[in-house]
Amino acid sequence: MNAVRLTPPATLTQPRLDGPGLVQATIPLASSKSESNRALIIDALTGFRCDLQNLSTARDTQTMIRLLKSTDQTADVLDAGTTMRFLTAYFAVTGQEKIMTGTPRMCERPIGILVDALRALGANITYLNQEGYPPLQIKRFSASAQSSNRLSIRGDVSSQYISALVMIAPLLPDGLTLQLTGAIGSRPYIDMTLEQMRYFGADVQADWEAKTITVAPKPYTPKPYAIESDWSGASYWYSVAALANDRIAGPLTAEINLLGLKAKSLQGDSAITDIMRSLGVESTFTDSGVRLTKCPTATSLTWDFTDCPDLAQTVAVCAAVKGVVLRLTGIESLKIKETDRVAALQAELQKIGAELVEIEPNHLYEVHQLAVSPSGPATIATYDDHRMAMAFAPVAMQYEIIIEEPGVVAKSYPSFWDDMARVATVKFTEASPAL
């Protein structure tokens, strides 16, 4: 049983999950890495004078903490995209010289839009390999040499570029106005950034009709801040509740209490409460968090994931198993995440008797349950993507399933397998020795 650890050893790579059973559990969710990472950047911009409580134990956040305090010339973010983008802006505005790099996949993820914006502010950044991609070198730049206080940036590629720029803006002597062009994706994550900035005393205004964000040159004020639990992590428990005991009659088949969540959350992924109502899960907020219980399931669901793309995999898998026809839009950004999540879903859903069909190129997709159910345990590849592992794990409420490379969950939810053991049988099998 020592294989089920916060971060599973590299040699133990396949948890085996068995179900079903009556699901009653209380889950102390992991803290939000999205909130944590923003709070850490703001804290660093105050000279590390804030009292941050309940920081995420996710690998991305721990990587951020390590690199913010490191004096090494090279900052290796591993596979943490948020950390790469936020630190690139932070190191540039604070006059540090750094080489930014990461895993091979990280170096395939674009960063050119952010670098172009920072260069327009006066930063000196060069690419060390392919133009527009890490690794890159940040050379010393003084914020007092700001060369522009107004930038135009696309809003439909990554909200993290926008968040990275506005968070450093209070330190710029002339402040900053961002003009967003095109559609604005993942807006709740931008709203989260702006609300956290305001909490720490920043003067920031957003005009969503004009698509502008204006930040005055007013330094942050150090304050205590407590991080909320992670709604992205909560989504997997919504799927567990949705899939629990669908084939067993009874008035109550699931009751899961998720601790540390707020009804009025800064996190866009709190949209899971509305999405999962159609998939058979009712949310009731309590003093300690939210309680999940069963409710009737719809036959179909249409959802635009533009503002909550990290929920798409979980919802797609859940709908596939329940036989709910799901129509998805707003998942274009999934193709440049830890893996091409659209392609990964198309490959792995087939293993559990479902398919993800592209109806309109790069826009509209549908999830359909196929006539043939899996005849034995499906083995799900995770593609070095934490969300692939956790999105498919709740299938164990219905069928035995094998998840490869369980260690990937450390990126956002290190205790996931420990928590899954509360509702399913979790067994690890050792990988074959390398030849």
Image: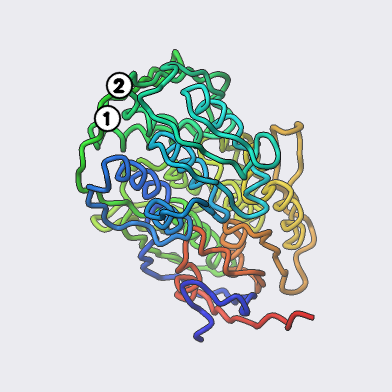
Q: Is residue 394 above or below residue 320?
A: below
Q: Residue at x 55, y 78 (%)?
A: 426
Give the position of the C terminus as an image quadrant: bottom right
The one nearer the camera, 223 or 262, is: 223
Q: Quadrant of residue 378?
A: bottom right
- Does any portion of residue 16 appear in the rendered image? no
Residue 178 percent coordinates (x, y): 45, 20
Q: Is residue 70 above or below residue 17?
A: above
Q: Residue furthest bottom?
A: 1
Q: Is residue 264 above or below residue 115?
A: below
Q: Residue at x 50, y 28 (%)?
A: 118
Secondary structure at numbered mark 2: loop
Residue 189 percent coordinates (x, y): 44, 37
The one nearer the camera, 167 or 172, is: 172
Residue corresponding to mark 1: 202
- Does any portion of residue 71 appear in the rendered image? yes
Q: Three-letter amino acid code at disc 1?
A: Ala
The one nearer the camera, 392 or 31, is: 31
State left or right for residue 50 relative to residue 141: left
Give the distance between the C-alpha atoms of the residues marked 1 and 2, in whole angstroms. Answer: 8 Å
Secondary structure at numbered mark 1: loop
Q: Are marks 1 and 2 in contact (CB under 8 Å)?
A: yes
Residue corresponding to mark 2: 216
Residue 17 percent coordinates (x, y): 60, 75
Q: Three-letter amino acid code at disc 2?
A: Ala
Local packing at callout 1 (Cα closer than 10 Å; few below 14, some 14-19, many 20+) is many
N-term-proximal mark, 1 vs 2: 1
Total numbered circles: 2
Residue 417 percent coordinates (x, y): 50, 71
Which disc number belongs to residue 222?
A: none
Q: Residue at x 38, y 61 (%)?
A: 29
